[in-house]
């Protein structure tokens, strides 16, 4: 711990105290090339910042990653939308008000996470309160610009925006509101314009639709590190452990 952070002002005394914290100790286990640890799950009794701060201090970001972000795997029972009721929601746990560039990175990372965990093609909707210019403001312009950036960076990715959520996930509404959309109302990755929208949406889906919500899961860190809500159940913990194991295998 001291060697990793001494240039940032870490002292031996402070390092000895920090490694008593199980989250810091766990991150050091992941950092150690000789360790048997491949992933870390925290958050049942820790805040998100208490989980992510040591991850970024010790593990850093994955190669080629510009932004660490968070997502939820949402599993909605008796649902034909998305991927038979499975969605990824991003970012619902970390970046408060991403700009267009950051939003594009969240979308790309979330599409990769979907394909890694679900095994099917990602179809990404960049969400807004507007569809194809039905409203105009700084808020909608950010999503429009982010969508353009995603298409430039990942030309093969199925992505569209700006879209209202009904036009993103319901094919009949997409035909009316977004004719010609490459997503065609079949989005399985939903990208929210800010943390307010994302956090509210995942909790509403979890409570009203009785969905399983796994996360916030992290993307962009050098090793698999995932957070939990402090309101999580034992089943939630087991689910996130399973997801972390899949990420480690990949």
Image (cartoon, rainbow, N blue to C red):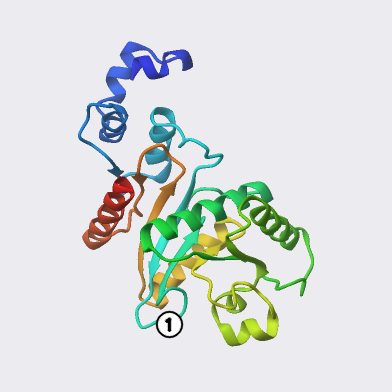
- Reading the image, the residue beneath label 1 is 80
Horizontal side, residue 174 vs residue 64: left or right:
right
Report x, y in % for residue 154. 61, 53
Residue 92 shows up from this direction:
no
Q: Say which of 148 and 196 sits in front.
A: 148
Is 125 located above or below residue 148 in the figure? below
Instruction: Tell me: residue 4, above or below residue 84.
Output: above
Give the residue furthest to the right: 136
Please tell me which residue lies in front, 122 or 203.
Answer: 122
Residue 143 in the figure: left or right of residue 118: right
The image quadrant of residue 14 is: top left
Q: Image point 27% across, 59% down: which residue? A: 239
Horizontally, is 68 left or right of 3 in the view? Answer: right
Which residue is rendered at x = 39% and y = 56% of the image?
116
* Residue 216 percent location from the top left of the image: 40, 54
The answer to whether 121 is drawn above or below residue 52 in the figure is below
Dividing the picture into quadrants, the one containing residue 77 is bottom left
Residue 155 placement (x, y as % from top left): 63, 57
Helix, strand or loop for disc 1:
loop
Please tell me which residue lies in front, 72 or 15.
Answer: 72
Q: Residue at x 36, y 54 (%)?
A: 229
Which residue is located at x 45 percent, y 14 percent? 9
Q: Give the tally of numbered discs.
A: 1
Residue 238 falls left or right of residue 78: left
Q: Quadrant of the N terminus?
A: top left
Q: Looking at the rendering, which quadrant does residue 59 occupy?
A: top left
**Residue farthest to the front?**
156
Q: Position of residue 163 (x, y in %)?
A: 65, 71
């Amino acid at each position: 711990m001291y060697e990793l952070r001494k240039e940032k002002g870490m002292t031996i005394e402070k390092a000895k105290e920090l490694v008593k914290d199980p989250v810091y100790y766990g991150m050091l286990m992941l950092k150690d090339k000789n360790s048997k640890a491949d992933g870390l799950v925290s958050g049942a009794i820790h805040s998100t910042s208490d989980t992510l701060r040591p991850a970024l201090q010790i593990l850093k970001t994955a190669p080629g990653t510009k932004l660490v972000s968070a997502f939820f795997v949402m599993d909605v029972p008796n649902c034909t939308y998305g991927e038979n009721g499975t969605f990824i929601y991003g970012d619902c746990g970390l970046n408060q008000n991403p700009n267009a560039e950051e939003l594009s990175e969240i979308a790309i990372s979330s599409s990769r996470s979907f394909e890694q965990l679900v095994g099917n093609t990602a179809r990404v909707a960049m969400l807004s309160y507007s569809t194809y210019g039905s409203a105009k403001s700084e808020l909608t312009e950010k999503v429009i610009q982010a969508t353009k950036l995603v298409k430039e960076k990942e030309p093969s990715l199925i992505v569209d925006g700006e879209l209202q959520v009904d036009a993103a996930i319901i094919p009949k509404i997409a035909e009316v509101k977004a004719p010609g959309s490459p997503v065609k109302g079949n989005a399985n990755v939903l990208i929210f314009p800010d943390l307010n929208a994302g956090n509210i949406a995942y909790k509403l889906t979890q409570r009203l639709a009785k969905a399983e919500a796994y996360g916030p899961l992290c993307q962009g860190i050098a090793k698999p590190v995932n957070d939990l809500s402090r309101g999580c159940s034992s089943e939630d913990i087991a689910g996130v452990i399973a997801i972390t194991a899949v990420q480690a295998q990949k």
